[in-house]
Amino acid sequence: MTCPSCGASVAVGARFCESCGAQIGQPDVVPAAPAAVDDHPLGDAPISAPTRKPASALPDPPPVGRRPCTECGGEVGPDLYCLECGTKAPSERDHFREQPASWVAGVCDKGVGKARNEDSMALLAGAEPGSRAVLVVMDGVSNSVDSDVASLAGARAAREVLRMPLPAGMGTTGGRQAAGAKVLADAAAAANTAIIAVTDPDSTNPASATFSAAVLEGRQVSWANIGDSRTYWLPDAGTPVQLSVDDSVAQEQIAGGIAREVAETGPQAHAITKWLGRDSENFVPTSGTLELTESGWLLACSDGLWNYCSTPEAMAEQVRAAATSDPAALALALVAFANSCGGHDNITAALARVDVTVDPSALGHNDQTPTPAEPGTPGGEPTDG
């Protein structure tokens, strides 16, 4: 069998595609993609305009079993094992990249220490550098079932909600921020709905995931998060900032006065207090805005990266050490850095390059510090991948 959405091979009787998360047996609308990224490994390339391509205009999916084995050249079967030598082929889900525009790119990687990639990302960008970008990163909770499928479905659902510009509200600063926060909350709700839709209704350990989204519109960044995937603003020369606030036991300990390095290395360092999924009790994200006044990088990432450089200063040091203005090259460098540190978790780095070319003193500055989310029910918190 082949997936009607991305053309990947799927096992007979499968309900969902393990590559793209699409439901098998139901029609799917496939977004049109720029020619430069038509070969997106997961079958849904990033989109820069809200245009749609009819299913009849799509190329036929490749036949089952025609993928060549990297070891002997034989056929690779639907289960990803070579029919000739038995070697398991790497899954496109283990490492994929997106670059919807020259100034926005991301890399999602399995990492060294994980058997599968439960991270996901979904990116969107206008062609003009600095115009508008959407970065969505989700980290499937490793101790739940099918979180790899769920996180990818959730990330793409959130991206579609964020496709249009954020509303201006009543025109005031407060009204604009409130209206943007509402849309970001809608994106999180859409991600939650998508996760539930691809979760086996009989599962006793339903899929769940963290959520981090950042929207750049000109000089303004709006962000939202649930769980412990993060958003950073990393200026080229100024003070770096961690924009999001984790929903985690470690964050509660930090708020209580425990040193960050102690809390983030303790036994419950990655126990999260909020998440998306069927068993989520609160999927309203923490959100905020920031007006940018200098050039730098907007980064959304999973804990597989920030595990090794948690503070904004440490993350900025890694970004500056890469010495590149190419977001694709920088995302690869950050993933390589995390893998060189052990790669104990899945790794995702999504970046947008911001170049401020006018005098920043002529711009207003509005830095709304997000209020930490209410902690979840103590005990039994899932540990994110």
Image (tube, rainbow, N blue to C red):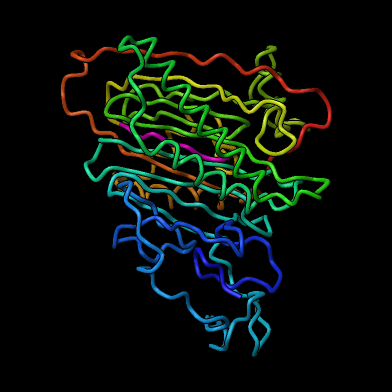
Q: Exactly how many numbered labels are in the figure?
A: 0
Depth check, front residue: 358 or 151: 151
Is residue 260 in view?
A: yes
Q: Quadrant of residue 14?
A: bottom right
Please name the residue shown 52% across and 67% down the image: 4
Residue 328 in the image, given as x and y percentages of width and height? 36, 51
Where 19 sits versus 288, above or below? below
Q: Identify whether 9 is placed above or below 109.
A: below
Residue 312 seen in this snapshot: no
User: Which quadrant: the N terminus?
Assistant: bottom right
Query: Viewed as shown, does residue 310 lie left or right of 51?
Result: right
- Front residue of 349/13: it is 13
Indicate whether 89 appears above or below 328. below
Q: Position of residue 107 (x, y in %)?
A: 46, 51
**Is residue 298 rendered magenta in the image?**
yes
Magenta stretch: give its range.
Answer: 296-302
Residue sitting at 45 percent across and 56 percent down? 29
Residue 217 in the image, given as x and y percentages of width and height: 31, 30
Quadrant for the C terminus in the image: top right
Magenta span includes 339: no
